[in-house]
Amino acid sequence: MIGMAVGGGLIGLGLPQPIGAIIGGGAGAAAVWFAGKWFNDATTDREMIDAKTGQRVLFQRRHTLFWIQMQWWAIPVLIAGLLVAIGAAVPPK
């Protein structure tokens, strides 16, 4: 949504649509990357001892989609933004 808002706002200001798509895709990818890094912060992992078994248990914050950590989804978001920009730059036949 951040990328769409940024890209749409820039297009509304008179920038060509491909430029708005590139900047919007980049903004969306940056938002996904930093949010993913924040959500998956390893410094918040906690280690506890199970009272019954005496074994260590590690509680980790992991936010994933299809087993891929959230911050790595920024790459497909950026690629999608570039593909939209290429599609907008190619004139229809």
Image (cartoon, helix red, strand yellow):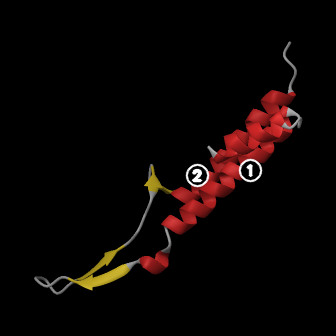
Residue 41's spot in the image, x, y percent?
50, 72
- 53 over 32 or under it: above or below: below
In depth, the one of 31 and 13 nearer the eye is 13
- Which numbered dot is residue 86? none
Residue 90's spot in the image, x, y percent?
86, 25
Q: Quadrant of the N terminus?
A: top right
The residue at 35%/80% (across/down) is 46
Q: Image quarter for residue 92?
A: top right
Type of amino acid at the residue the image marks with label 2: Trp
The residue at 81%/28% (across/down) is 88
Q: Are marks 1 and 2 in contact (CB under 8 Å)?
A: no
Q: Image quarter for residue 3?
A: top right
Q: Residue furthest top?
A: 93
Question: What separation in Å lies between label 1 and label 2 (alpha carbons)?
Answer: 12 Å
- Which numbered dot is residue 73? 2
In depth, the one of 56 and 45 nearer the eye is 45
Classed neighbour count for the residue bearing mark 2: other residues with Cα under 10 Å, few (<14), some (14–19), many (≥20): some
Task: Name the residue that disc number 1 marks.
Answer: 26
Q: Residue furthest left?
A: 52
- 36 over 6 or under it: above or below: below
Residue 38's spot in the image, x, y percent?
54, 68
Q: Is residue 82 visible?
A: no
- 60 over 3 or under it: above or below: below
